Image (cartoon, rainbow, N blue to C red):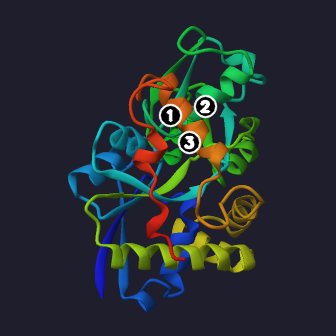
Amino acid sequence: MREITVGVVAPAYANVPLWVAQQRGLLERRGLRATERILGTTHGVTKALRDGAVDIALSSPEGSIADAASGGPLRVLAGLTDRPPLSMIAIPKHQTFDDLRGGRIGTSSLTEGTRHVAERMLAAHGLSYPADYDFALQGSHVERWKALQAGTIDAALQMIPYDDIATDAGFTDLGPVTEEFAFNAVCVRLPAERTWVTAFLAALAEAAQWFRDNVEESAVIAADRTSMEPRYALAACRKLAADGVIPADLRSAPGALAAAIGALRSSGLIPPTGAGTDPAAAAVDYSYLPR
């Protein structure tokens, strides 16, 4: 067996295909045994990948895109989430987006992931950063839920099923993310051994298809991995299985990838359009995916 370490932010439901691949022996069948390493933040996962502390990462692709655009060794090999399964959850006293003016928005990173998705969502409701609110670095959705309960932040994007948990606890659901955005991807550091990387991606692709065909059984696996109530796990898996969330061929939709690149440009993390290397061409390599 080839032992590999997979860097992840948290035991998030976006990683259900990995859990299915582990539980159903799809990795072992290909000579792999994968152990997750939880890093707590998206930039923490990117750093671990860059430093060689993990073999492969399931995380926001933005750090790898920015790295590749600047000539670095990180690459995006597959897309796992084209529409983030997130909702903007606010503390009970806030009932509208406008109530968040002057507030603190929890995020897992100031340069990747939920920061960009939240900024785009808030902008669509007339709030601009930094004039109307501030970001608070809180870590994963699990840590953001703790911060919401403690009242140290005003709102945060929450991953399934923490959106349902929050609303059941009396918090305000201001609505789900509806736009395309490449939120979760498979990333690697070059040079990468093609044999095991392709085997890993083949197992993920098979697991993703099995998940779509067996949502209730997948929810049992997810509930066990997260010690979550079965009803919450099932609701989360049903949302994850909805059309447009996980790309069917593990290739990010062009619009989802463009949204992530646009967010990087607007934040000044990669050069503007027309300046320097095309970030998608530099960073995305689907040749490792099974044919």
CA gap between label 2 and label 3 equals 15 Å
Closer to the camera: disc 1 or disc 3? 1
Numbered label attached to residue 136: none
Numbered label attached to residue 145: 3
Residue 261 placement, left or right of 50: right
Residue 76 placement, left or right of 146: left
On the image, the x and y values in percent for residue 274 come to 48, 26
Q: Secondary structure at mark 3?
A: helix
Amino acid at the residue labelled 2: Ala
The residue identified by callout 1 is 107
Residue 41 appears in view: no
- Quadrant in the picture for residue 190: bottom left
On the image, the x and y values in percent for residue 71 come to 28, 41
The residue identified by callout 2 is 118
| N-term mark: 1 or 3 | 1
Q: Secondary structure at mark 2?
A: helix
CA gap between label 1 and label 3 equals 11 Å
